[in-house]
Image: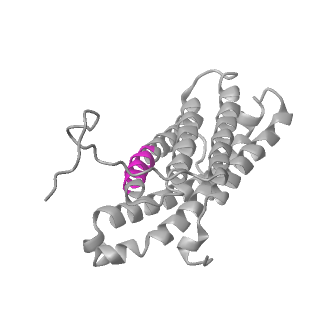
Amino acid sequence: MTAPLVDEETPLVQQRQQQPQPQMNKQDVYAKWSIIAGLALFVSLVISVLVRIPFNVFTYHPLFMTTFIVLVTEGISLLQPTSTEIEKKRGLRHHAIIQTTSYLSAICGFSFIFYNKVISGKHHFESFHGKMGLFVFIYLFVQLVFGVSMALLPKQIFGSVDKAKSTWKYHRVFGYILLLLVWITAQFGVRADYMYNNLYSPHLIWLHWVSLALVFGGLYSRIRFDKWGIIRQ
């Protein structure tokens, strides 16, 4: 067998050829920045209110819930266009970490508003925002259990890994519904008297609708309906 020709420029150890990383198309890039812009606008509006009021027990509620909203949105967004096996595994790992952190933030936010009602002698869950918040909190717990069961206990809960994988689209659909409910609940929250009355200007309230449109416009354009079996390419 003839040895391959080598010269002084031939590397002694052949480097493993790296697989090219898939690039997001322009629509996905624009959608990504739309989501980021929407989140940044929402956070800015909330912070602009919190800096105008004395820091107290209630303040922890919007702080933790805003953190929750940002994390739960990002946790879904980062999983959207994933194509390669490496992307999916990395995305799933980050999704699990971010969503777990978001759930802890929700627990903190929920606990502080509950405690604030106790020390203020007020009734719980009287407003529509409060009732929606309780429903979302329970929904979030069920969705978390669903996701953990699929990822960590596929054989024990579903019978096999393949059966567990077949339920992923339902987890994703319920996740989008949950996210929509989270943002609707937030829209009622920012219009509560305590938040609305401390806006720099009441006319700024419409910007919350802009943040909602930017986030969900970006999320919607990144959904691959063909993977759900709804639209076939």
Q: Which residues are magenta?
A: 89-101
Image label count = 0
Main SS, magenta region, reads helix
Residue 140, percent from left and from top: 49, 57
Q: Is residue 54 magenta?
A: no
Q: Is residue 98 magenta?
A: yes
The answer to whether residue 127 is visible is no
Q: Nearer the viewer, residue 46 or 81?
A: 81
Q: Is residue 107 above or below residue 174?
A: above
Does the rendering let one see residue 173?
yes
Which residue occupies 45% across, 50% down?
21
Quadrant in the rendering for residue 153: bottom left
- For residue 174, which quarter of the picture? bottom right
> Where's the C terminus, which quadrant?
bottom right
Residue 36 in picture, x, y percent from top left: 63, 41
Q: Is residue 196 left or right of residue 1?
A: right
**Spot occupied by residue 118 in the image (x, y as percentages of width and height):** 52, 39
**Which quadrant, please, contains the N terminus?**
bottom left
Q: Give the answer, above or below, for where 18 lies relative to 181.
A: above
- Can you name the residue that lies furthest to the left here? 1
Image location of residue 173, percent across then percent down:
55, 67
Q: Is residue 30 left or right of residue 83?
A: right
Residue at x 21%, y 40% (from the top left corner): 13
Q: In the visual, does 152 lie left or right of 3?
A: right
Residue 38, compared with residue 163, is above or below; it is above
